[in-house]
Amino acid sequence: MATKISTELLIMILNNVQSIQDLHSSLLVNRIWCKVTIPILWELPLGQECCTDNKKLRKKALCIRTYISCMDAQARTLLIQNGFYLSLSPPRVTFDYPSFTHKLRTDNLVYFISIYSPQISPLQITGPGRYNNNNEISITKSRILFHEICKLIINRCSFLEYFKLAKVPGEFRNSDLIGSILKLPSAPEVFRKLESLTLKIRDELIYSLYKSLKLICENILNMDLEFNSHDQLLPEFISVQKRLENLSITSSYFLNCNSLLWAIISQRETLKILRLKFLNFCHFWGKLSPIGEFISLQELYIDDCCEFNLDCQLLASSFTRLNRFHFRNKYGTPQEFIIKILETANINLKNIYLDLYPTITSDTFSAILNYCTKVTKLTLYNLSFEQVIAIFNNNFNELRVFSFDCIEEGFDANKLLCQMDEKILEILKMERGYLVLIV
Ligand SMILES: *[C@@H]1O[C@H](CO)[C@@H](O)[C@H](O)[C@H]1NC(C)=O
Ligand SMILES: CC(=O)N[C@H]1CO[C@H](CO)[C@@H](O)[C@@H]1O
């Protein structure tokens, strides 16, 4: 019966199978099922988030052996010359496994290599520690292996849709390890279709990366990047994107983010989700012309950013379509900026989360009551008892979930419930000391 399904249909079905166990079973059905399942299974080791279960990790790390089996004679000779024993990786394979890779996470690769080379633990690789001779040898070995596997994948796969560069130990990056991979002749073609890019590395390596990627990748949808330098490469890389939808940036407080913010503004037609962390807004310069609307932006998350200057009001007034607004700050609250956002997005806002230091001001609180009347989910910290009551007495007809905590000493949930009318149907749960109410 199994063979009656067309191969196209089978591919579609098996692509939706989530369980690795089920995929393993489907390998055994017949040759056609096996042929369809192998590429799906081989997407996973380097593409999926690593579990923390040691036993499973060890099993997954076996992919390293298979990758070595797939290497050409030249690469294998290089490994042997550097002290690898390849008896467990004979140069005979049924499938071209590296060609199935379309998602490449270097953090996984680093873990697997550290498991494969038992002399060094992942801790030693990622930690700053000192190494004795033996360890230095094994680090050199790991570095060579890391490089050869990256090279293998870039040379064999037809395209990468997801690339994450993170947790690559400093020792691996000598002599522009990653840059040399991007200089492989096949790299431009492989990276051209990139849709998701995560770069979590803070050193000069990143500059050559941006330079190369800027020339290749213009159609990225999701980016999760760190802003580390005063220079222009990251803003330029963002600016060349044609359909960027989801952008996360983590910065450092002491950096001037003006050009970065303008690069983000250049993406205002396509951006749907924007997350900013540790940005210092003090250098933002609004120019003279209006910023224009972020016509697609639905979700804005601002975490621990600081020094919002007056020009930031212009920025706030361009977020007209926001549906979800999340703001958390332990360094003082830019009241005008927040109020401007609440006023601008107004009844479009359905989900608001504010965790303000030291407490939510009465002007900000009034802005919520006045502008955001269509909110369905509201999370507010550090409220006074009166403010809690005011939320229930406001005309939030669509409010379904209200999470809050109350700064008042001796806050009594029972007393609160007695004061509220029959709008409250159910107390959902007491969560980490916060009361979550379903209205
Ligand atoms: C947007 O990017 C963030 C960070 O990379 C990710 O966690 C999130 O799942 C993405 N959201 C969507 C809808 O793709
Ligand atoms: C003044 C005060 O109570 N601040 C609290 C506001 O809420 C956050 C998050 O719940 C707490 O960490 C602060 O201590």
Image: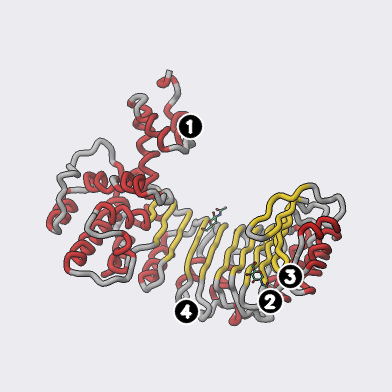
Check disc 3 and give the amino acid type. Glu
In the rendered view, does 211 fall on the left or right side of 222?
A: left
Tell me how far mark 1 sits from mark 4, CA to CA: 48 Å
- Between 426 and 79, the one lying in front of the other is 426
Which residue is labeled 1 in the image?
Answer: 13
> Mark 4 or mark 3, which is nearer the start of the sequence?
4
Q: Which residue is mark 3?
A: 409
The reply to whether residue 158 is in sight is no
Q: Residues within 10 Å of mark 3 (few under 14, many from 20)?
A: few
SS state under label 2: loop
Q: Are marks 1 and 2 in contact (CB under 8 Å)?
A: no
Q: Quadrant of the N terminus?
A: top left
Badge 2 is on which residue? 334
Q: Earlier in the sequence, mark 3 or mark 1?
A: 1
Disc 1 within 8 angstroms of ligand 1 (CB): no
Task: Look at label 4 and name its amino acid.
Answer: His
In primary-sequence order, the first of circles 2 and 4 is: 4
At horizontal 44% and vertical 54% (from top left) the residue drawn is: 194
Q: CA distance from mark 3 to mark 1?
A: 57 Å
The secondary element bearing badge 1 is classed as: helix
Residue at the far top in the pictured view: 1
Disc 3 is placed on an element classified as loop
Instruction: State ligand 2's quadrant.
Output: bottom right
